[in-house]
Amino acid sequence: MGDPALLFETIVRSVNTIDRHQFDGVLHHLPNNLLIIDDSGVIIYANNQLEKTFGYTKEEVLGQKAQILIPDYQRKLNAKKRSEFYTRPHALPIGSGVEVTGVKKNGEEFPMEIGLTPFNRNGANLLAVTIIDNTKRKKVEEDLIKKNELLNLGEQINQIGHWQWNVIDDKITWSDNLYAMFQREKGGELCYETYFSYVYEEDSQFVLGRTQKILEDKQFYDFFHRIKTGTGQIKTVHLMGKVFLNERGEVAEMVGTCQDVTKQKADEKRVELFTQQLQAKNKELEMFAYVAGHDLKEPVRTIGAMTQLFMQSNGASLNEEGRELMEIISNAAGRMKQLINDLSDYSKLGTDRTQSTHNCTVIMEEVCKDLAVAIDEANAEIVFNKLPVVQCYRTELRLLFQNLISNAIKFRKPNEKPVIHVSAELNEDCWTFTVKDNGIGMAKDCLPDIFQIFRRLHSREEYPGTGIGLAHCKKIVELHEGEIWVESEQGKGSTFYFTIPLS
């Protein structure tokens, strides 16, 4: 429906051709509020809509100043504007931007827009005032402003701008953040050539080809390319979008986003370089492990064999000091051989990178069979119930259980039967395994370093070994992307925990 004020003006021009009853009927059924006021600002007519909007009946407002419909703080300004209006009265239809604050009978204020139509009736200067309640529209506008502010903030944080391309007219609209990203001043019309002028020269053919494919296939393919900004800065951007077709099936419009991923791409290159360097270091370590596992074994084996041969041939002629020296050499060669074997095993952990599903109960049963001699000699008791089925590296997980059980047997109390409990608990994203013993335990200040390679808490005379066992355990758990830790107290045993992720 058209502007009620203009409609009223039409009615006024033809009012002499209709009777009063018809006149009132038309005005009362207008969809908006309508007042007629005289040149002193007194309301002489109000339609039925007024009561719905302001809460006043017609009888309550007739004869009252129209100012009762606006707040006290606006009345002086309103009187000034009315005086200026009457010096040169003219029609101001709805949409002319005349916005004021209205006040209802209950004192509630609300935004409204008014239209003004001056007319003369029997020599009297009258004014028809059309009023629209703008509460809903203002609420929509405020919500839209807030959403736009949130959108702009999100774009700034993520270094994203959005764009819209009218393909048929070749007109492009950029968001403020896109102007900032391309370091271009706002102003002037944008088209595809505008965007293409920023494309880095070496990427131009790629961008042209990708654009052509999008137009031909009528669907958007996200892609990366470089741009040269208005200040000459080289950036990498990621384009994403959507294609819209017209009724003839032609590409009519595209909308999408452009994200500055320069830092992300630089970080990816640094990670790639670091990965290459890490792989090179791993190869060096593998070579070292090969040397340790092969080239070093031979001289150590020779020392041990020659020492044994010398003792067989000349042992009887040696005095006690000589025999002790030869024993020291033989024991040192044996320890060196064991150390080389342990280092070689440590370097091989995780070389088989294929996980599979295995039952930990079965693995524990195999470990107990492997350690049967040590378990019998120590009169140890290994307690475990049904353990879970997990995704794991089977050989490494078996070695993990074996090292923890062996340690629990080795570091037992002299006159107490070792009892070792193995259990598992399901958590939100992993299985937490527990290996608890009643052994000699450890001082709390030793716990932070216990998983370091070659870390020993006791002399070789007290407890033999190379100090690599728990380092093995840590590497195996980390290979499974889990965690390992220990709780212990001197003389009260130790409890080792480790996690295996569910996936």
Image (cartoon, rainbow, N blue to C red):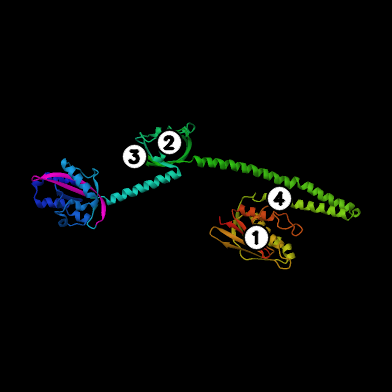
Q: In this view, does 10 lie to the left or right of 241?
A: left
Decide: few, some or many residues near mark 3? Use Cα within 10 Å; few <14, some 14-19, many ≥20. few
Seen from the viewer's position, the closer of residues 294 and 56 is 56
Q: What distance separates the C-alpha of mark 4 from that of mark 2? A: 57 Å
Whether 452 is drawn above or below 287: the answer is below
Q: Name the residue under label 2.
A: 183
Pointer 2 and pointer 3: residues touching (CB < 8 Å)? no
Between circles 1 and 4, the one closer to the viewer is: 1
Q: Which amino acid does label 1 sit on?
A: Lys
Q: Is residue 328 left or right of residue 131?
A: right
Whether 315 is drawn above or below 383: the answer is above
- In the orientation shown, which residue stands out farthest toward the bottom? 416
Q: Which amino acid does label 3 sit on?
A: Arg
Q: Where is residue 313 in the image (x, y as percent from the top left)?
A: 89, 52
Residue 162 colored magenta?
A: no
Name the element at disc 2. loop
